[in-house]
């Protein structure tokens, strides 16, 4: 187990050396926003009884093809990456980037910036048809 932990530690250090704290934060926020939006879409979409099914069907109850679902997820991940970059830039601009010491963030200004980005992305991808 120690060898695996050493490898993980080595990989994290290499990533931080290459991309820095901002790169790490952007990658983390990309994945965080993506997973949060996926969770939201799977659990609250259209208020139907079978919520998980609504992720895979249009409003007309036609199933999306696997290619359509993959395309949507790829576009969502790309939008989350763009959004994460906007968050990092805003945190830098407002001198809040060093205020992130935990996640979820305890600083309400940081939390608001991330929440605003989540809402922005949802407004872009919340409806697929």
Image: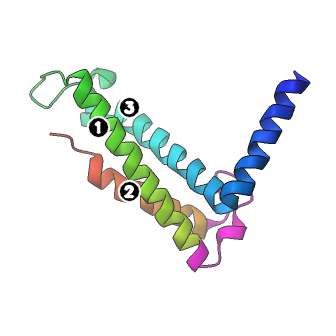
Residue 108 is left or right of residue 90, and the answer is: right
Crowd band around label 3 with a 10 angstrom C-alpha radius: few (<14), some (14–19), many (20+)? some
Residue 5, quarter of picture: top right
Crowd band around label 1 with a 10 angstrom C-alpha radius: few (<14), some (14–19), many (20+)? some
Residue located 47% across and 65% down the image:
86
Residue at mark 1 to residue at mark 2: CA–CA distance: 18 Å
Q: Residue furthest left?
A: 60
Residue 1 is left or right of residue 46, and the answer is: right
What residue sits right under mark 1 in the picture?
72
Between 50 and 79, the one lying in front of the other is: 79
What residue sits right under mark 2 in the picture?
119
Is residue 48 something that shows in the picture? no
Between 128 and 46, the one lying in front of the other is: 128
Residue 32, quarter of picture: top right
Q: Decide: is 17 above or below 10.
A: below
What residue sits right under mark 3 in the picture?
43
Q: Position of residue 95 (x, y in %)?
A: 65, 78
User: What stretch of residues is rendered in magenta?
Assistant: 92-108
The C terminus, quarter of image: top left
Q: Residue furthest right?
A: 2
Between 80 and 43, the one lying in front of the other is: 80
């Amino acid at each position: 187990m120690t060898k695996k932990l050493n490898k993980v530690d080595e990989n994290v250090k290499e990533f931080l050396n290459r991309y820095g704290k901002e790169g790490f934060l952007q990658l983390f926020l990309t994945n965080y926003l993506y997973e949060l939006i996926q969770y939201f879409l799977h659990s609250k979409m259209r208020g139907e009884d079978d919520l998980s099914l609504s992720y895979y069907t249009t409003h007309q109850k036609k199933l999306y093809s696997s290619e359509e679902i993959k395309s949507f997820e790829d576009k969502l991940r790309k939008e989350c990456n763009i959004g994460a970059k906007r968050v990092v830039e805003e945190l830098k601009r407002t001198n809040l980037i060093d205020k992130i010491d935990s996640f979820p963030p305890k600083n309400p200004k940081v939390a608001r910036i991330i929440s605003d980005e989540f809402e922005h992305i949802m407004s872009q991808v919340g409806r697929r048809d």
